Image (cartoon, coloured by chain):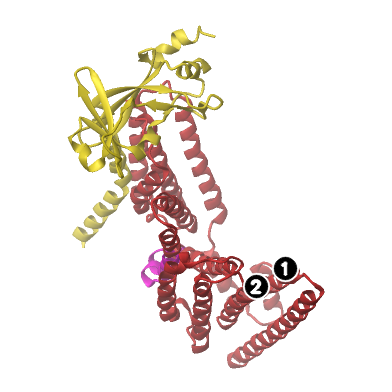
Amino acid sequence: MSTTKKLEQWRASGLLDEAAVERILAWERGRRRPLMVWALGGLGALTVAVGIISVVAANWDALGRGVKLGLDLVLLTGLALGVFRARGRWAREILVILYFGLTLASIALVSQVYQLGGDVYAALVLWMVLASPVAAFGCSWLVAALWLVGLNAALGTSLEAISSSLDEPAMFALAIGAYSVQVAALLFAGNAGWLRARRPDFAKTFEIVGWAGLVLLTSIAQQLWYADPDGDLLWSIPVPLLMAGLLAWRAPTFLSEPTRSAVRAVRAAILVSIGASAVALLPHPDIDFLAPLTFIAVWIAFAAACQQVGRIGLLNAATAVIALRVVIAYVELFGSLLETGLAMIGGGLLTIGLAWLWRRLARGFKSDAERTEEVGQ
Amino acid sequence: MSAVWTKRRLAALAALLLPVVGTVGLIVRGELALRGSEWRFKINGHDPRDLLRGHYLTYRIDWAEQPADSECVDCCLCMNRLGDEQHVTRVECYAAESCDAWLRVGEIENLQRYYIPEDAPRQLEAAVMAGRGELVLSFSKRGGMVIKELLVDGRPWREALGWLAGED
């Protein structure tokens, strides 16, 4: 239901007076973001960038080296000045996206003109070095997301290029270390006061991607129980553990209301998820039944943190993931009659426990809401 | 206040011009490499089914390497001119700076494709397959290197298109 309809219902039932409804509507109008304009504008900007590249490619033979590079430099300089002088927010965002994309296209163009068949990672790293300051002139989540895509493309291709000259333990340590540091850096940046004040949408995007990265990477790590890693992953453990310590230490800064229980639950989620991942990285034989168990344990920690910070939607999502994993575990553990029976008893008890836990948490929410209502009166 | 504002504006403009400066730097590097010493090598198509991959002509360069005195670990191709002849041998990279031109062996792969227009005739591919192609590489003193030209029958490939079109 739309805000207007809700407000109309509340006004009709006497909860709000006319003046309050008007004030709320005026405030909502001020907060409204032109999402459609940004989405269409961003799409248009990307289409123009791709079109320019295609036109240049189609007329390759007709244009001389100097003309092609001259046009490119004029376009780059024009966009730089456009971003510098643009006053309207969405116009500036679109110019930033165009300039950001055209910088990569320029590197590719120079590479083609001089027949430099260099490595892809070198082009992407150079792109990020040259174009990151340009991205900093944007404000929207779209620019932040595009910058993160570029950063990860550069990081991924660089890791692949470097890994060819490393032995396996060093390669794993480098990759796991790099992604652990990235997740921690995104969470710290997303909660940094200076970024929240100057670029709130950047901060929000970094925070969301940071948490999503933590959840995704630690969930994947639990699948290692299906494998039997030898000492190859041992050197991959210190960096994630260091990041876990730093994140747990700074957990209060990640919360808008850092109550004692909320901080404790977020710290527990960080330490349990990364700690379980570190244990899975230790040398061990394949112990299949631990994969669903540690996965569920990690997700219970996430669910508890969501409940403590009052994110009911995320709590429901986490509960659904746990239930789904339990169902998958049933199928995985089907084997002999005895194994199937034990699996079903264990899985059934776990599901009942889950339902009981969810009901208890839901009651907690209800009583919290009632208390808040009483205080309000 | 005004001076601080001006400094900030200048810093912002400088940050925004970074891609322009970087692109100019890449162009200067390319131009310097084009003006370096020229070396010619024969090329051969190495995959008859897929010589033209996208818009790129792919091939192998025949370096006509002389046997090396010893095995190398961090290998470079060392190129020297002995009269009119090119002499190429494999050496350790730390010893390559005394060569007339040099190239890391790991970079060879990057030289084995050449951008050509979408509508280039298939006869160009056939000519390269028949061993009629040559590559002109240009090396700057500082180790920069570019592909300067693709030759067919000793002429730039664009000129060669005229007589290649009549071949079947």
**Residue A67 position within the rendered picture, expressed as x and y whole percent measured from the top left:** 35, 26
Tag of residue A292: 2
Tag of residue A332: 1
Horizontally, residue B24 falls left or right of residue A141, namely left
Horizontally, residue A288 falls left or right of residue B4, namely right
Note whether residue A350 is visible. yes
Q: Magenta span has A194?
A: yes
Tag of residue A157: none
Up the image or down, A64 lies above or below B168; here it is below
**Residue B9 position within the rendered picture, expressed as x and y whole percent measured from the top left:** 26, 54
Q: Residues within 10 Å of mark 1 (few under 14, many from 20)?
A: some
**Residue A14 position within the rendered picture, expressed as x and y whole percent measured from the top left:** 68, 82
Q: Residue furthest right?
A: A337
Mark 1 in CB contact with mark 2 (< 8 angstroms): yes
Bounds of the magenta segment? A180-201
- Identify the residue shown where x is 17% and y is 35%: B98
What secondary structure is marked by label 1? helix
**Residue A115 position within the rendered picture, expressed as x and y whole percent measured from the top left:** 37, 30
Note whether residue B36 is visible. no
